[in-house]
Amino acid sequence: MVHRPLDQTLSVLQPLVEKARTMGLRLFGTAFDRPLTLEDPSVTRTTLAETAARLQGPYLLAELYLMSRERSDPQPLLTLTPGPTLGETLGIDLSPESMDSLTHLGRLTEPLETLVDVLNAHLATLTHDRLYLAQPSLRLIDLPADLPGLLLAPEEALYALQYRLTSPSGETTVLHLLTVALVDLLVASLRGPAVESAGGGPPSLESVLGPEPAGTGGEPVVKPARFAPLEERPGPAETAPSAIDLILDVPLTVTVELGRTTKTIGEILALGPGSIIELDKLHGEPVDILVNDRLIAKGEVVVVDDNFGVRIVDIIPPTKRAQSLR
């Protein structure tokens, strides 16, 4: 088996890793109401046996599978985080003896499943709907005793991606274990003219998993929105499944949602001309695209002649789109 240099591998995986980093911090930070950062990233080649030899005690295990629509061998991806320190970082009790540990696992599952949905939409765009992640499972394990129950063979070659997750209440270590076969499948699916023409040399891991930009704080600055003009770009049209050919001309309502917020009755009554409502979206963050009030894509606002439009940057696979229209 040929092993690619780590920097070359990371340069190909950068768009997906960056999406996971940005959305993961945002989703889990919102779910647990605290700012989160990733620090000191590193990547090495190892095996499960080598990794488990230095891991002891209770760990939170997230198990995922990378699925290919062209192959029948799903590739596992494991994430291991020490339970006690993760609990401190997020402000919850994940100790095995805690009566609330199952409740907290449920709180962790929701943002993780949302992150997988976002990554699947991104994967569908990057790989032309060839790859997707199966929904994850979470459980508390004790290492090294539970090592035989993991999805990986002890001597299987792995990439170990590790970093520190920090918050005002604590810090912990997050370890992703990816099989070489999984990474090769991703690289083969992501490599193409769009990736290779990006220019420049391969980035370091620190540039891929760098810290979140710090907020400026203070009063929000209100500026008129400025949008780039839309460029016409030819693209391949997706072929709809034959089962829905008979309803392809049924009109559907498409809504672009800039953002939302919550206001009290008193605040609503106090609104008037010139009032500013701050939304939960950050400047530059993709807007939500809904069809029949169901989220199907993310996009960026553009100007088409004198009208506003939206350019799609992430979209769920066609099969899921069809299911969401039921």
Image (cartoon, rainbow, N blue to C red):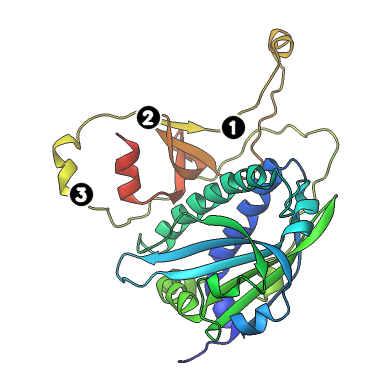
Judge whether 82 appears above or below 219 on screen.
Answer: below
The residue labelled by disc 2 is 292
Q: Judging from the image, what secondary structure is the residue with disc 2 in?
A: loop
* Residue 177 occupies quadrant: bottom right
Q: Where's residue 58, x and y in %? A: 71, 63
Mark toward the viewer: 1 or 2:
2
> Does the rendering let one see residue 249?
yes
Left or right: where does residue 264 sit relative to residue 159? right
The residue labelled by disc 1 is 259
**Label 1: how many Cα within 10 Å (few below 14, some 14–19, many 20+):** some
Q: Amino acid at mark 3?
A: Pro
Judge whether 78 appears above or below 246 on screen.
Answer: below
Q: Amino acid at mark 1?
A: Gly
Q: Where's residue 60, x and y in %? A: 65, 60
Q: Where's residue 203, x and y in %? A: 64, 75
The residue labelled by disc 3 is 241
Left or right: where does residue 193 sit relative to residue 94? left
First in residue order: circle 1 vs circle 2:
1
> Of all residues shown, which one is farthest toward the top?
269
First in residue order: circle 2 vs circle 3:
3
> Does the rendering let one see residue 47?
no
Q: Nearer the viewer, residue 13 or 177?
A: 177
Q: Where's residue 175, x and y in %? A: 67, 69
* Residue 148 occupies quadrant: bottom right
Q: Nearer the viewer, residue 169 or 239?
A: 169
First in residue order: circle 3 vs circle 1:
3
Residue at point 48% right, 71% down? Answer: 195
Q: Give the Cα distance between marks 1 and 2.
A: 17 Å
